[in-house]
Amino acid sequence: MPHTISRRDFLAGTAAALAAGPTLFAAEKQPEKSPRYLDIHVHLTHRWFGSERGPVTADVLLRWMDAHDVERAAVLPLVSPEAFWYPVTSEFVITEAARHPDRLIPFCAIDPRTLGTHLPETKQVVDMLNRYIDAGARGFGEHKALLDIDDPLNMKLYEACSAAKLPVLFHLDNRANMDKPGLPGLAKVLKTFPELVMIGHGKGWWASIAGGLAQPDLHVGYPAGPVAPGGAIDALMDRYPNLYGDLSSSGAHALLRDREFGSAFLRRRADRLLFGTDFYDLTQESFPQFDLFRTFNVEPKTREKIAHSNAARLLRLG
């Protein structure tokens, strides 16, 4: 099994190596103009059961975006029990984002297990998705349910998303959208729905940048050491043009753990990668995604694709 490091150690090491990412509401000064960022992965939250955790309201999110030169952001609901401490519904996200349509781009989500009870017909699911689209939704996710990624209920959901032309941002590890090393379940999804854009995120997804994995490796957030050849992500991207990667959370570490590989991967897959941070908590301080372009000395054209234009194209933004 590959050597691993903890999230705490990784963030501390990243801060030292990269001279620290920007703090919460103070943007880091850059030697050159920052790219215009379209963040594919942020969240809004609210108080629940007297939690002391301060909510990320729309106003808080906008202040954070301003401090980090984020022009627009896709806001993802969290509707499955596995996704968050409490539900953050599609309706809540759409309503909050509607107050700032020039900055916030709402996604929608449906727990796939609903399709086995209240939405048994695919047309019913498509109709619900179309109502979300009419209300402003541009994508589906964060899709994060305790099912195999190719479970029949998930496959039914993907069919509906494909019909509605909604890209799906999915979380993959050993507790959500589970798969085996090599990601054969994801390959089945991509082959079955060639018109459906799938955007990978999460521990198991980014661990799969490397080959030689065992099942427990799909739940390690910050694997350490060189990237072993034979990773599923490269193999699947070669075969399926509808597969993309979300650089939020463990995505930055997947590239920074092996800088020679990461630099080449970032350029090789520049048309398939989307900038993201997974901001959801006021206590978050380190966002190494903002340092990737400088660390790898990325060319402006490549930087613009990853930071903005790839996501704008997938979400059909004007």
Image (cartoon, rainbow, N blue to C red):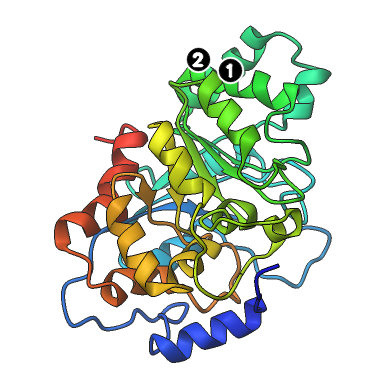
Q: Amino acid at mark 1?
A: Glu
Image quadrant assignment for residue 45: bottom right
Give the Cα distance between marks 2 and 1.
Answer: 6 Å
- Residue 195 x/y as whole percent: 43, 21
Q: Amino acid at mark 2?
A: Ala
Residue drawn at point x = 21 percent, y = 56 percent = 302
- Residues at badges 2 and 1 in contact (C-beta under 8 Å)? yes
- Residue 32 x/y as whole percent: 16, 77
The answer to whether 189 is drawn above or below residue 6 in the figure is above
Disc number placed over residue 163 in the picture, else none: 2
Residue drawn at point x = 49 percent, y = 52 percent = 41
Tell which of 247 and 109 is nearer to you: 247
Residue drawn at point x = 66 percent, y = 75 percent = 4
Disc 1 is placed on an element classified as: helix
- Residue 277 x/y as whole percent: 47, 62
Pointer 1: what residue? 159
Q: In which quadrant of the rendered image does the C terminus lie? A: top left
The answer to whether 255 is drawn above or below residue 286 in the figure is above
The answer to whether 163 is drawn above or below residue 62 in the figure is above
Q: Is residue 212 left or right of residue 199?
A: right
